[in-house]
Image: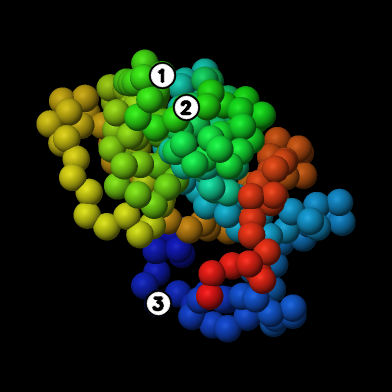
Amino acid sequence: NVSQRCPNRVRIGYERDGGLASQVVAPAENLYPLPDELAALAPLVEPLTVAVHSIGRAAVRPGAGAAVIGCGAIGLMSVEVLRARGADPVLLVGTEDDERGGGLAIGQGYGAVPLVAGSAEMAGWAGSCESVIAAAGAPAAVRTGIELAERGATVVVLGLGIGPVELEMDAAVRRELSLVGGFGAIPEDWLDAVALMRSGAVTAAGVADLGVPIAEAPA
């Protein structure tokens, strides 16, 4: 099932109105039940499915090192998914703003090793990760992912709005890296995401606190 690749797909809130409506009519096959105790996390299920799908593209192995670039909702929940899949250690790379804003601390609470991009500490982890999730929409995220990837690793790019990226392709070729895209999610990812939340493997603790009230959002 690769329905998210269809160029003619119609999504609620994108090609079809209703993304911010209090009520919306949706196809039955698009509905996934959540227990009452997880109702507050319902808005985070969709970004979690993106994390689940992209990590599935990386073929994560238990005990193998992994890294996440970016401290947004998808990046932070990617840390929890990787931990649930058995990756160890899991690095979380963010900017100095992420450090000041608490994103790196949230990831550390999930068991990740927090690193500031471009720091000497991050450089010490170069070439150590079998799977890398570039979850930030910036060219530097892709370059950092390649820097952290070990020989034969897979780097999954899911951040959008990146535009052209200048890469050190000789290094990628010599190390036989696989650079793949991760986009959206398929029905199986939604089922997996709900199961991860039900089991407590993904708590998204602190992620919702990073949001901005609608009244304060840029126009």
3 or 1: tag closer to the N-terminus = 3
2 or 1: tag closer to the N-terminus = 2
Residue occupying the far left of the picture: 170
Q: Is residue 127 left or right of residue 186?
A: left
- Amino acid type indicated by mark 3: Asn
For the residues labelled 2 and 1, the Cα–Cα distance comes to 7 Å
Q: Are marks 2 and 1 in contact (CB under 8 Å)?
A: yes
Q: Could you say where residue 29 lies in the image, as x and y percent from the top left?
A: 65, 69
Q: Is residue 4 above or below residue 167?
A: below
Residue 26 picture quarter: bottom right
Mark 2, Cα crowd under 10 Å, few <14 / some 14-19 / many 20+, is many
Secondary element at tag 1: helix
For the residues labelled 3 and 2, the Cα–Cα distance comes to 40 Å
Q: Could you say where residue 116 lies in the image, as x and y percent from the top left?
A: 44, 30
Q: Nearer the viewer, residue 101 or 37?
A: 101
Q: Is residue 54 visible?
A: yes
Secondary element at tag 3: loop
3 or 2: tag closer to the N-terminus = 3
What colour scheme does the image use? rainbow
Residue sitting at x 39%, y 63%: 5
Residue sitting at x 51%, y 56%: 185
Q: Is residue 167 left or right of residue 127?
A: left
Q: Could you say where residue 164 lies in the image, as x and y percent from the top left?
A: 22, 54
The residue beneath circle 2 is: 115
Q: Nearer the viewer, residue 30 or 109?
A: 109
Q: Is residue 113 above or below residue 211?
A: above
The residue beneath circle 3 is: 8
The residue beneath circle 1 is: 121
Q: Nearer the viewer, residue 61 or 42?
A: 42
